Image (tube, grey):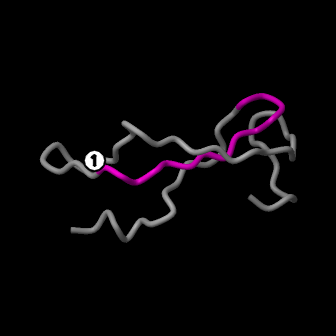
């Protein structure tokens, strides 16, 4: 996240990026389950708001 970005909740510009993986899965519908894609979060250090969630390789989600 760019340094000039502000948290929509508290207005802070202090963020950290964290990664959730392991049992985290992404399922576009009930019939398909994709695993192995870690979910990354950008989190405000002041209030804990998750301001962005994303995967680094979204093309791997395409069948």
Q: Is residue 42 left or right of residue 23?
A: right
Q: Is residue 45 above or below residue 16?
A: above
Q: Which residue of the protein is positioned furthest toward the front in this rendering?
A: 22
Asked which secondary structure carries label 1, the reply is strand
What residue is disc 1 on? 27
Q: Is residue 37 above or below residue 19?
A: below
Q: Is residue 28 left or right of residue 23?
A: left
What x and y, as percent, mark residue 13? 87, 47
Q: Residues within 10 Å of mark 1 (few under 14, many from 20)?
A: few
What x and y, as percent, mark residue 30? 16, 43
Which residue is depicted at the point 27% across and 68% down? Answer: 62
Q: Which residue of the protein is positioned furthest toward the top in this rendering?
A: 47
Q: Quadrant of the C terminus?
A: bottom left
What x and y, as percent, mark residue 1? 74, 58
Considering depth in this image, is 6 or 36 the residue closer to the camera?
Answer: 36
Which residue is depicted at the point 81% across and 55% down? Answer: 5
The verdict on residue 38 being magenta is: yes
Asked which quadrant contains residue 4, the reply is bottom right
Q: Is residue 57 left or right of residue 47?
A: left
The verdict on residue 52 being magenta is: no
Q: Which residues are magenta?
A: 35-48
Q: Which residue of the protein is positioned furthest toward the left in this rendering?
A: 31
Q: How many marks?
A: 1
Considering depth in this image, is 34 or 50 the residue closer to the camera?
Answer: 34
Which residue is depicted at the point 57% across and 45% down? Answer: 19
What x and y, as percent, mark residue 41? 60, 45
Q: Is residue 42 left or right of residue 11?
A: left
């Amino acid at each position: 996240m760019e340094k000039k970005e502000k948290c929509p909740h508290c207005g802070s510009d202090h963020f950290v990026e964290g990664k959730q993986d392991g049992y985290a899965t992404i399922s576009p519908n009930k019939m398909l389950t994709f695993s192995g894609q870690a979910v990354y979060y950008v989190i405000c250090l002041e209030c804990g708001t998750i301001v962005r969630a994303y995967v680094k390789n979204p093309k791997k989600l395409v069948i």
